[in-house]
Amino acid sequence: MPTSIITTDDLREFKMELLDDIKKLLSRQATGKIKKYLKSSEVMELLQVSPGTLQNLRVNGTLPYTKVGGIIYYDAEEIQNVMTANRVQHGLNS
């Protein structure tokens, strides 16, 4: 089995690539970008709801979803639209 010698230059290059990747991830997180499609566990965490509540939101048509194989996906933009549509504002004169 051939062995490879890793030089300090190799390590330095790896370090720079790793730092660039970390910076990209942090900048994405800082700008508040959310993935286009979220899995059920991510939606439960985002909305702070239980699996049963999430299922009820699916069944009663509140949250649209897509099922691929056995995995359920939710469009992040549609979740935002549902939240906006169901906003309750108190104290406004009508």
Image (cartoon, grey):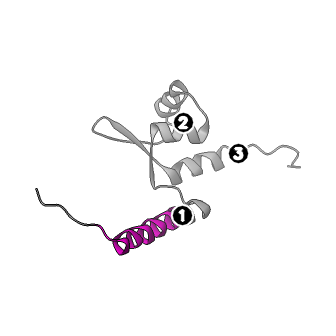
The residue under the point 24% across, 66% down is: 5
In the image, residue 80 lies at what x, y percent? Answer: 58, 51
Residue highlighted by disc 1: 28
Task: Measure the alpha-carbon separation of dots 2 and 3.
Answer: 19 Å
Q: Is 23 positioned to the left or the right of 4 in the image? A: right
Q: Give the magenta range.
A: 6-25
Q: Which residue matches tag 2?
A: 44
Quadrant into which the N terminus falls: bottom left
Label 1 Cα crowd, 10 Å radius (few <14 / some 14-19 / many 20+)? few
Q: Which residue is mark 3?
A: 87
Whether label 1 touches label 2, CB < 8 Å: no
* Callout in the foreground (1, 2): 1
Left or right: 57 as drawn, with respect to 12: right
- What is the distance, in whole Å, between disc 1 and disc 2 at their CAs? 21 Å
Q: Give the spatial CA distance, label 3 vs label 1.
A: 27 Å
Give me the residue at 58% from left, 51% from top: 81
Q: Is residue 71 above or below residue 35?
A: above
| Nearest to the observer: residue 4 or residue 29 | 4
- Element under disc 2: helix
